Image: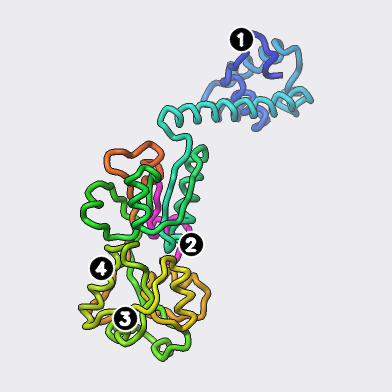
Amino acid sequence: VCLGMCDRYQVADLRVFRQFIAVAEEMSFRRAAARLHMAQPPLTATIKQLEQELGAVLIERSNRVVALTAAGQVFLQEARRTLNQAERTLRLTRRAAQGLTGSLRVGFVGSCAWGILPPLVASFRHAHPEVDLELKEATTAQQLLALHNDEMDVGIVALPLAQPMESDLTQWPLYAGEFGAVLAATSPLAKQSGPVALAELAEQPWILFPQQEGPGLYQVICEACAQAGFRPRVAQTAVQMSTIMGLVAAQLGVALVPDFVARASGLAVAYRPLMGPGTPVPYRLALVHAAGHASPNVQAFCSSALTPRDMASKGIEVPV
């Protein structure tokens, strides 16, 4: 129907489509005219001329609109489809002009998969469905190397970063929280209520991630322990937060993790906030990309990132 119209309405006088849709939805020329912010007589004349050009009655009416004819129902369906396609065409064209097409390679540390990453990705995909996300879990060190080698566009890393590398990157703060102690459920420290002094962990075997995989964060933890009067006795190392939690549950040692990781694990562990010298032990995440080389996709991803407070304000549940 829509493609067989005469020259006046071909390709499409989208204005006529919108006017017909308004009349069909309101079932009233008066209400449709008010909705379109126009006078009623020219609206009535437009629909009448449309019917004459098509050679078909679209609307049954006496003194008012009664119903759509079979032809009118087909025209309504096709007009809506045409408008939707036209709007999609304009949107995609604008996005292509801005560079918002193609793919985006995103790295992330494992901890943020426990509550930070899902709403961030969902927010970006909702706003930019034409961009394909390629997600890869990697340590902070692995992500920095991938960014340097142009094998990754943007990373979600744990701060702080090593000074030489930091100057080559643009950072977007994403999360700011604190470490707490995670203990096996059978540990005597787990049975006491309330915070645990960091110094109380001095005699415990520790489970830490390898220093080379996150040297900045590793140093933060070691400096906190030094302020508490001890050096952690590392019994096991593990890269992934899920592995660290599993080793703690297996009673192989204690570890420091962000609270949202401990609460989401579902394992037989106890989480205790830290107190005393050396605390708080900060845990911060940031989005990073090569300085001066941010594509439109990278800028859009970083700009759409939601902090936990933003998520809460939007009704998104995320442990913080």
Residue 88, horizontal then vertical, whole percent: 55, 30
Q: Quadrant of the C terminus?
A: bottom left
> In 3D space, how far apart are the residues under numbered discs 2 and 4 (Cα atoms)?
32 Å
Query: Looking at the image, is mark 4 or mark 3 earlier in the sequence?
Result: 4
Which residues, given as a range, are shown in magenta?
304-320
Residue 54, horizontal then vertical, whole percent: 72, 13
Q: Are marks 1 and 3 in contact (CB under 8 Å)?
A: no
Which residue has dot 2 on it?
Answer: 317
Which residue has dot 4 on it?
Answer: 219
> In 3D space, how far apart are the residues under numbered discs 1 and 2 (Cα atoms)?
52 Å
The disc placed on residue 186 is none
Q: Are marks 2 and 4 in contact (CB under 8 Å)?
A: no
Secondary structure mostly seen in the magenta stretch: loop
Query: Looking at the image, is mark 1 or mark 4 earlier in the sequence?
Result: 1
Q: Quadrant of the N terminus?
A: top right
> In 3D space, how far apart are the residues under numbered discs 1 and 4 (Cα atoms)?
73 Å
**Pick the front one: 44 or 122:** 122
User: Residue 15, located in which quarter of the rendered image?
Assistant: top right
Q: Amino acid at mark 3?
A: Arg
Q: Is residue 11 above or below residue 113?
A: above
Which residue has dot 3 on it?
Answer: 233
Q: Are marks 4 and 3 in contact (CB under 8 Å)?
A: no
**Pick the front one: 123 or 158:** 158
Q: Nearer the viewer's eye, disc 1 or disc 3?
A: 3
Q: Which residue is most to the right?
A: 70
Residue pictured at 45% horizontal, 52% vertical: 120
Query: Looking at the image, is mark 1 or mark 3 earlier in the sequence?
Result: 1
Query: Looking at the image, is mark 2 or mark 4 earlier in the sequence?
Result: 4
Residue pictured at 32% horizontal, 46% vertical: 148
Label 1 neighbour load within 10 Å: few <14, some 14-19, many 20+: few
Magenta-drawn stretch contains 69: no
